[in-house]
Image (tube, helix red, strand yellow):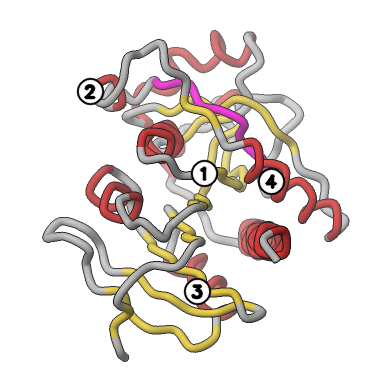
Amino acid sequence: MAAATRLPRYVIIQHTFREHHEILRGRLDGRREVAPLDPFSQRGEVGSWQGIEIAWYSGPAGEPTLVPVLEQGNVEYVFSLGLAGSMSKALGRGDLVLPTASLRGDGLTDYWADPMLPAVADADALSAVRQAARESGIDLASGIFHTTPTLYREMDFIRKWSALGVVAIQMELAQHFLLAHLHGKKAAGLYVISDSPLAGEEIWRSGVELDETLSSAYERAVDIVLGAIRILSEEMI
């Protein structure tokens, strides 16, 4: 497999299981490997979908993965795909949620920017995801997420933030949004609800069981993000 020499305009970062990222790999033609962009970054791949080049990385999306990607001059949009725990009684397993922003509860992003700077999604990227979902006849929930450094503590504060309208919790979104903003990139994410901490489920005890509900939801999420990329690409013509 030949290595790509640069990243394209669109990048997808996935934080989920091998079974999930195989869905995206199956959508892309002519895949080729992206060598690590610096000594600490992960390998990725580049492929094409409807003639649009897209790069993707799979695994933890912390600073060592994100920063080398965001430093690439040709990259403009970075989408994240992952799983989240519900903090809303209206959201259940398999629902798709579009985060508009994330509370910076991770304890890490404070090293990069003043705590007063919010971690928010890009308006153009959000609009494209919403349009792609509408075209597919899929309802998306949306709202503010909470990014936590550890699932062991989520039950300590979940009811507080739920009462204030926070809809979901996960572990990487604040980094994704804030680092993209600091590097002048446009970021959005689409998450599948995997469990419900609000109902007392403790994912760190039981793990996430991959079943048809999650697999089907993740397929829909992948197709929506690809649709959003198509919409953004057409706007540039």
Q: Determine whether the residue tagged by mark 3 lies in a helix, strand or loop.
A: helix
The residue under the point 27% across, 68% down is 43
Instruction: Tell me which segment is drawn in magenta.
Output: 97-104
Residue 203 lies left or right of residue 236; in this view the side is left
Q: Which residue is mark 1?
A: 186
Which amino acid does the dot numbered 1 rest on?
Lys
Earlier residue among tags 3 and 4: 3
Labels 4, 1: front one: 1
Earlier residue among tags 3 and 2: 3
Earlier residue among tags 4 and 1: 4
Q: Is residue 105 above or below residue 10?
A: above
Q: Which residue is mark 4?
A: 96
The residue nearer to you, when weighing 131 against 23, is: 131
Measure the C-alpha gap from mark 3 to mark 2: 34 Å
Q: Are marks 4 and 1 in contact (CB under 8 Å)?
A: no
Residue 98 among those drawn in magenta: yes
Measure the C-alpha gap from mark 1 to mark 2: 21 Å
Measure the C-alpha gap from mark 2 to mark 4: 31 Å
Mark 4 crowd level (few <14, some 14–19, many ≥20, 10 Å Cα):
many
Point out which mark residue 111 bears. Answer: 2
